[in-house]
Image (tube, rainbow, N blue to C red):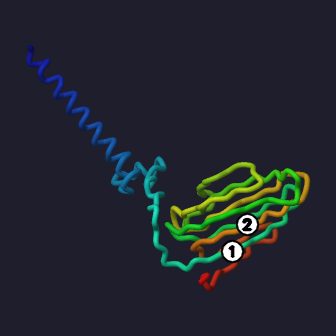
Amino acid sequence: MKEEDREKPWGLFGAALVFGLLAFVLFVLPAEFDRDPTGFGALVGIKGMSGYSVGAMTPQEAGYREDEAAFFLSPFESVEYKYALDAGQSLVFSWRATGDENPDILFDMHSEEEGRDPEDSVTFALGNASNAHGTYVAPFNGIHGWYWENRGAEAVEIKLRTSGFYRSATVYSASGPFTKSFEDPVD
């Protein structure tokens, strides 16, 4: 065997090691461990990706609260309703549109991270439906909630019921924002 042929595998091994290390520093560290020594992870939008996970059991320091809200929407009218939640806080929700035989509601369940541009909101559910139910856990501090738009020809009422660990809720409508604070938690 020639000397050059024996050195070839070591050269390939060295190149693979360099590329693996580069991939680890540029992609794995920012996405999985929220460590971004080069700034590349923030540049491509992967920094902190794995930070959106929470455990199955999360004790809460904040008080437990319940809320009910109703919004009347004429055709092509819209409203937003968002809760102030810290990272890891949760809410259970159920909303339903009534008043039309087949309500056509466009909805967007999204969040805006505290201190960030509202245009950088993160959407978790988007579509057309007349109702939705579930559990939501905030991946970061900010405001979290829904945008609803009546796409039908008849007026509808959106009824929302929630329970969880929020501090306040804000309605964003044509008449401007209105914030409702929840002072006393439910016993």
Res 67 → quadrant: bottom right
- Residue named by callout 1: 67
Residue 31 percent across, percent down from the top left: 41, 50
Residue 104 percent across, percent down from the top left: 82, 51
| On screen, residue 24 above or below 51 | above
Asked if the residues shown at circle 1 and circle 2 are in contact, with their CB atoms under 8 angstroms apart, the answer is yes
Residue 108 percent across, percent down from the top left: 69, 55
Cα distance in 3D space between marks 1 and 2: 8 Å
Most distant residue in the bottom direction: 184
Most distant residue in the front direction: 187
Q: The C terminus appears in which quarter of the rendering?
A: bottom right
Q: Mark 1, residues whose alpha carbon is within 10 Å: few (<14), some, or many (≥20)?
A: some
Q: Amino acid at mark 1?
A: Asp
Q: Is residue 117 visible?
A: no
- Which residue is rendered at x = 72% and y = 55% of the image? 107
Q: Amino acid at mark 2?
A: Leu
Residue 169 percent across, percent down from the top left: 67, 73
Q: Is residue 108 left or right of residue 24?
A: right
Q: Is residue 182 visible?
A: yes
Seen from the viewer's position, the closer of residues 9 and 110 is 110
For residue 160, the mark is: 2
Q: The N terminus appears in which quarter of the rendering?
A: top left
For residue 4, the mark is: none
- Which residue is rendered at x = 46% and y = 58% of the image? 53
- Which residue is rendered at x = 62% and y = 61% of the image? 118
Question: So how many labels did they put on this image?
Answer: 2
| On screen, residue 4 above or below 93 | above
Q: Secondary structure at mark 2?
A: strand
Q: Is residue 130 left or right of residue 136?
A: right
- Which residue is rendered at x = 50% and y = 66% of the image? 88
Of the two numbered discs 1 and 2 on the same chain, state the one appearing first in sequence.
Answer: 1
